[in-house]
Amino acid sequence: MSEDNSQRGRPARPGGGGDDRTPPGAGLIGWFVRNPVAANLLMILFLLGGALSAANLRTEVFPTISPSVVQVAVIYPGATPEEIEQSVTRRLEEAVLGLEGVDRVRSVASEARGTVTIELLDFADPQQVKDDVETAVDSLQDFPPEEAEEPQVRVPQPSTTILTFALTGPVSEGTLREAGEQAERELLSRDGISTVRLRGVRAYEISIDVSEEDLRRYALSFDEVANAVRASSIDLSGGEIRAEGGEILLRTDARRETGEEFESIILRSNEDGTRVRLGDVAQIEDGFQDDPLISLYNGEPAVFVDVATQGNEDLLEVRDSAAAWLEETTLPAGVHATLSVDQSEVFVDRLSLLARNAILGFTLVFLLLVLMLDLRLAFWVALGVPISFLGGFALFGFVGVTLNFVTTFGLIVVLGIVVDDAIVVGENTDRERGKDQPEDKAAIAGVTGVAAPVLVGVLTTMAAFGPLIFSGGEFGEITRPIPIVVICILAISLVEAFFILPSHLAHGGNWSRGPLARVQDRVADMLGRFAQGPLYSWARLAGRLRYLVALVGIVVVVAAVSLVATGVVRFVFFPAIEAEDITADLRLPDGAPFEATERAARQLVQAAEALAAESREDGEPLIRAISTVIGGRTSLFGGPGTTTNTTIASNLAQIQIQLTPSAERSISSAEVERLWRERAGSLPGVEQLSIVSSAGPQSGACPGQGASRRRILPASSAG
């Protein structure tokens, strides 16, 4: 066993040792082989540059996509969905249909609110379409209706809710509201956080109840009182005065924000010097809007604070900043803050999966190669995986790629194919070394001998992913990082296989010694016998029965296509995955009393509490927390390109249960959902009940949003 490993079982080429001809195409490859310092510097550039780029790469849940809709909303207090449809949404549809850049128009008419969503064509300018929509809406005669508010035209900016804090405690609604506003201010003041929303709490309202008896006593009319209130609570600019000493800004700053301030409004000044104030004829109270709303977290009154990312904000930076606030904040007495939902956990789990797969892939590649090839060759071929990946990361910053769900999917896809070219080059180099060639010439010949097929193979893979870069619409924007990731990493893998790997294989001799060399000899002998025996026989048989083999191949292809066509194998872009929460949205008929909604919601909550108690008794807790909102509903995690919408209505309710981590329970979220449905039983008066237990973009979707009337019109529709 004293002979060189590289020559065991290798037939020597006659005269191979004296052939000094340079293989074709070896110019740049030969230069790197003769200059290993350059190859090592290039490798270090990829490794360090990729590591620095990965550390500073912006993270987000989904790729940021440009807005593709324009929304027009009109608030019409007291109007029914039928009235909204006739007097608001239909007229808006007629005004915007046919505008340049409009693809189709969707409208939703609900109690006291009408919303028209205008979907844009690919590559249309949202701001230009918004301006056209505003012009079209302003041109409508007698619009909006007299008691309706002015139309609000906007281009919704996509945002993703990352964290939800629950502020709870046995305190008044006002105290919870103040705590929520304090949390909102403190979170917005922290670096990296720009979007914070309060949820599950009513808006402030100052009620002024005028006494008819007092009006008669002071000889006042209701209109006089209303006009005095309107004129005495304004914040208005009055222009400026230019003087020699500078400019003086004039401004009326008389906006009143508390009931006590409104009490001092002067309604009338009498000739005897007495004054009639608003507090003399009205009862004024600081309170909340009349809309009934109940928010609970584990049975306690609560306010929910959502922290979202928008635009170019970094997911992990936002999470870390919000987590630091939770540890540092001091809320009013009796109020406690709890992290209720953390969507970043799913993203971090995906990164952990990618890291585990990368380590496992590197280990498996190395172990398989070391069984058949020299230890040095196996090491440098396997090292091509981290070099290619980190080199690809170094390019991501230049092409605008961020780290998100879609990017990690592309990284997982390319992980299985990135090392193929290095394996082919390494094996061919080992074969050339067996021909008694010097190591440097064997390395050059090993690359040039397979350069064409390796290059064509990698370019073919790039070409297969390339068209996705030019896909249009939201789907194209979401999937665009996948081909960019694949192409960048495959391009670096070609550079590594053609220039860095040959330099490493051309120097250093063999590393395999002792028992490892004997194991490699045994494996090589077994593979040789298999190739010359069964594999050779099967290949000859397939050659003789070529028409039958072709027919079998066609049958397999047809069967695979038919599985998709018949729906046996479904196409789902975002598959349902094990969820960490379950959301139930219920809706009663429009106009249903709040008490009926509360009864149905509490029935669901009691069923969830019973399920939680049973699981604790069985020693396997399933439910961490239960969040309840009665009198409203929020679209929670809507996926890429969506916006968070909250609907307040007495016939809506939403219950969300947070499950224990999937690794700590043996029951799936789908099974927990089924058990919850069983224990809830029949819900009298409920018109629609939607329970979703799938994590991902469909999670928390709220079909209907309380709407009773919907219309979807193509841009070519006449009305």
Image (cartoon, rainbow, N blue to C red):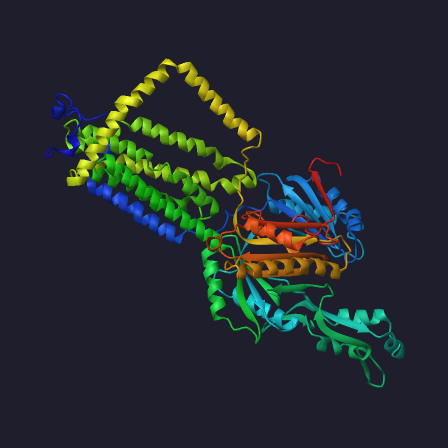
Q: In this view, does 16 lie to the left or right of 651?
A: left
Q: How many labels does the image show?
A: 0
The image quadrant of residue 247 is bottom right
Residue 629 sits above or below residue 496 on the image: below
Observer-nearest residue: 626 or 84? 626
410 with respect to 336 (left or right): left
Q: In which quarter of the image is the C terminus?
A: top right
Left or right: 357 as drawn, with respect to 652: left
Q: Image height check: is 119 above or below 686? A: above
Coordinates of residue 599 in the picture (x, y in percent)? 71, 60
User: In the rendering, at what x and y percent does residue 412 appear?
Assistant: 41, 42
Farthest residue toward the left? 2
Q: Can residue 158 be seen in this view?
A: no
Residue at 32% from the left image edge and 43% from the top image edge: 362
Q: Nearer the viewer, residue 630 or 149?
A: 630
| Residue located 48% across and 59% down the image | 318
In the rendered image, the quadrant that contains the N terminus is top left
Write down the quadrant of residue 419 in the picture: top left
Q: Which residue lies furthest to the bottom in this view?
A: 272
Q: Is residue 657 depicted above or below 274 in this figure? A: above
- Please tell me which residue is depicted at 11% across the width and 33% down the height of the picture: 3
Query: Looking at the image, which is closer to me, 212 or 164?
Result: 164
Q: In this view, does 180 lie to the left or right of 294?
A: left
